[in-house]
Amino acid sequence: MREANGDLGGLGLRPRWVLLCFPPMAAKLALRLRDLDKGELLVGEFDDRAAALAWLRARPHNMEVIGVASSTELAEDDELELRAAMRPLDEDERALAHALDEARIAALREHIAREQARFESDAAVERAAMAV
């Protein structure tokens, strides 16, 4: 990259002509997914909305779509079209998703209980130190 005048005052600014000489990048569409067999969270990236729509209609078995992961905001119409194109979970997939959700909730409850016990223990130690 060349600078227009060689001195941009150390501000990290680029001359306007440098910004305009590159074609705009096409925004890819990314979806947050969950593999219902493994419980893994994934990101599926599609070159465009048409590719994402086609994939959503033929969504692989035991692959749940959590939502859009793209950093660019979608128009409301595009988001509604993506939701409408998505093949709903079948009964088996719903059962797997529910089991994964329940396991995650149980793990969060255990984590909260451990943190609460640690906090109460630390507070008891501090109270005892202050009483001395």
Image: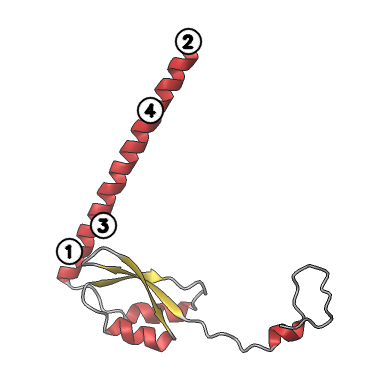
Q: Residue at x 46, y 21 (%)?
A: 126
Between the residue at mark 3 and the residue at mark 1, the CA separation in whole angstroms equals: 10 Å
Q: Compare residues 124 and 64 and report the one nearer the observer.
A: 124
For badge 2, the amino acid type reads Val
Q: Label 3 to label 2, Cα distance in Å?
A: 47 Å
Read off the residue under disc 1. Answer: 95
Say few, some or many: other residues with alpha carbon within 10 Å of mark 4 (under 14 / 14 to 19 / 20 or more): few
Q: Which structural element holds mark 4?
A: helix
- Report the colour scheme: secondary structure
Give above or below for 69 relative to 117. below
Quadrant containing the N terminus is bottom right
Return the disc, 1 or 2, that comes first in the chain's sequence: 1
Tell me whether the residue at label 3 lies in contact with that at label 4, contact meaning CB atoms closer than 8 angstroms: no
Q: Which residue is mark 4?
A: 120
Q: Of the residues shown, which amino acid type is indicated by label 3?
A: Asp
Residue pictured at 47% horizontal, 77% vertical: 76
Mark toward the viewer: 1 or 2: 2
Looking at the image, is mark 3 or mark 2 earlier in the sequence?
3
Mark 4 vs 1, N-terminal side = 1
State the image quarter where residue 92 is shown. Answer: bottom left
Q: Nearer the viewer, mark 3 or mark 4?
A: 4
Label at residue 132: 2
Q: Quadrant of residue 81?
A: bottom left
Q: Nearer the viewer, mark 3 or mark 2?
A: 2
Are the residues tagged 4 and 2 within 8 Å (C-beta)? Answer: no
Residue 101: numbered disc: 3
